[in-house]
Image (cartoon, rainbow, N blue to C red):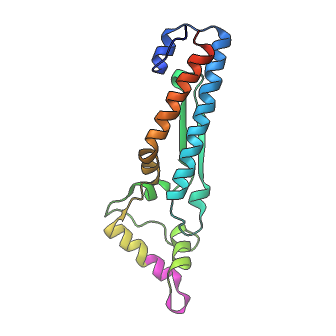
Amino acid sequence: MLRRYESFEDLAEAPPGAREEAEVFRLAREAMAEITGMLRREVITRTPIGASGNLKGSIFTEIKGENPSVLRGVVASRADYADHVEFGRRPGGAMPPWREGSPLYRWVVRNLESRGGDFESVAFLVARAIARRGIKGRRMFARALEDNQHRVDGRIRELLDEIAGRVGG
């Protein structure tokens, strides 16, 4: 008779052999890769293009952990300004970088007009407005997970059923 596992904690209580343990880990990593890949695509669709589109291109996935009970999937960005786009910025504090070469300067050149091509002055004004008023966060990572939690939960249930069918007895 097959044993039904409801959680990874249930799996930890049943002592598997080395072959079963390796199979469980392989199945769990495969499921995690599917989940993080799906969430990455969802985050990218919610990410604003910005000045260069670099933010979308900086979003990556990573799988960490040496066994199923500590396996973690990461969807993140390498862009140094990703946190500001995700969470926004409260009013006050220092102005964001705005001089030529900065992401804000590139955004100004791409999206705003300037009299006589003085984009640096316009970028300064935008940076000052951001420092004074703040900006609202886009929450692309949080919303991608919130809107797809049912898909993540469903895939985990499928994984547990698959593990029970292959190594559960």
Q: Position of residue 106 (x, y in %)?
A: 56, 73
Q: Nearer the viewer, residue 89 or 35?
A: 35
Q: Is residue 109 above or below residue 64?
A: below
Measuring 38% from the left and 69% from the top, which residue is drawn there? 130
| Residue 100 position by quadrant | bottom right
Q: Position of residue 150 (x, y in %)?
A: 44, 39
Measuring 55% from the left and 70% from the top, which residue is drawn there? 51
Which quadrant of the figure contains the N terminus?
Answer: top right
Q: Nearer the viewer, residue 91 or 165?
A: 165
Which quadrant of the figure contains the C terminus?
Answer: top right
Q: Is residue 146 above or below residue 68?
A: below
Q: Position of residue 80 (x, y in %)?
A: 53, 55
Magenta-colored span: 114-124
Regarding residue 102, the answer to whether it shows in the image is yes
Regarding residue 81, the answer to whether it shows in the image is no
Say how many tags the image has.
0
> Does 33 appear in magenta?
no
Q: Nearer the viewer, residue 15 or 109?
A: 15
Q: Is residue 61 above or below residue 71?
A: below
Measuring 62% from the left and 29% from the top, which residue is drawn there? 29
Q: Is residue 62 above or below residue 40?
A: above
Q: Position of residue 127 (x, y in %)?
A: 42, 72
> Does 123 appear in magenta?
yes
| Residue 56 position by quadrant | bottom right
Q: In screen coordinates, is 90 left or right of 146?
A: left
